[in-house]
Image (cartoon, rainbow, N blue to C red):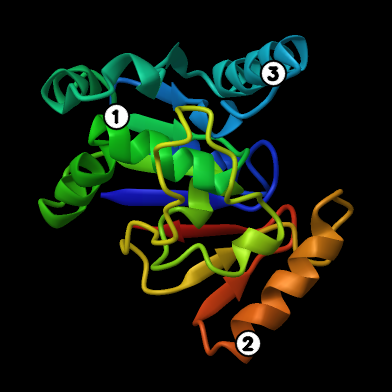
Amino acid sequence: MKFYLSSSYKFGTEALRLIEMTANGNRHVALIPNALDYATDLERRITSVALTISDLEGLGFTVEIIDLKQYFNDPIVLEEQLEHYDVIWVRGGNAFVLAQAMKLCGFDEIIKKYYRDRKNIVYGGYSAGVCILGPTLRGIHLVDDPHQKPYGEQHEAIWEGLHILNFAIAPHYKSDHKESEAMDKAVEYMIDNKILFKALRDGEVIIIE
């Protein structure tokens, strides 16, 4: 399993590497936009997702949206669907909302299985889509609201990440981004609470092959 983890919107400075990482695949991307499910401005959300699709298509990928809500309580069907892609691209938004969506459809266990089995697939994304891979979302709660519950108030906030990475990721660090100031506080929190992390400025990318 390979990882292309960007801090910023789009692909950072290593877009050509993403193309190289998928040279032997079918170039089909499953785009997961559920970190935006908290958004009330639907027009802005649609525009944002459309831009992500356009950017991926600009690199030569074929893109299909996988809305995790359609697979709540149906992880078997979701896993069957994911078999058609060699890239899973998880975009930004609210990391706590994303964690809820992943749990409710079983995506969390599917992706951990892919990692254990060293499946030939690329997990890519940015912001919330990369924060979710670490051991914890503590610290990120100073940037993203953990109390956003678009799938119902009965669901408790999830504070754990997927534990695929042994460190947390702090995106938008010292960057020209609206969340950069809040991320400074998140980094301070991680330092004070001895949470292993890597801070990424917008444009920086972590690649794991």
Query: What amino acid type should be assigned to the residue bearing mark 1?
Result: Asp
Q: Which residue is drawn at 21% across and 51% down?
A: 112
Where residue 136 is drawn, which disc sits there? Answer: none
Name the residue at the front extreme: 154
Looking at the rendered structure, the number of numbered marks drawn on it comes to 3
In this view of the protein, which residue sits in the foreground, 49 or 5? 49
Q: Residue at x 58, y 17 (%)?
A: 53
Between the residue at mark 2 and the residue at mark 1, the CA separation in whole angstroms equals 36 Å
Between circles 1 and 3, the one closer to the viewer is 3
Q: Position of residue 33 (x, y in %)?
A: 52, 26
Query: What amino acid type should be assigned to the residue bearing mark 3?
Result: Arg
In this view of the protein, which residue sits in the foreground, 185 or 155? 155
140 over 88 or under it: above or below:
below
| Residue linked to disc 2 | 191
User: Can the viewer see residue 186?
Assistant: yes
| Residue linked to disc 1 | 86
Where residue 45 is drawn, which disc sits there? Answer: 3
Q: Which residue is drawn at 18% across and 45% down?
A: 114
170 over 193 or under it: above or below:
above
- Taking 121 as reference, is 206 left or right? right
Q: Is mark 3 on a helix, strand or loop?
A: helix
The crowding category of the residue bearing disc 3, from other C-alpha atoms within 10 Å (few below 14, some 14 to 19, many at least 20), is some
The crowding category of the residue bearing disc 1, from other C-alpha atoms within 10 Å (few below 14, some 14 to 19, many at least 20), is many
Query: What amino acid type should be assigned to the residue bearing mark 2?
Result: Ile
Between the residue at mark 1 and the residue at mark 3, the CA separation in whole angstroms equals 25 Å
Going from the N terminus, do you reach mark 1 or mark 3 first? 3
The crowding category of the residue bearing disc 2, from other C-alpha atoms within 10 Å (few below 14, some 14 to 19, many at least 20), is few
- Taking 111 as reference, is 30 left or right? right
- Taking 9 as reference, is 82 left or right? left
Between the residue at mark 2 and the residue at mark 3, the CA separation in whole angstroms equals 33 Å
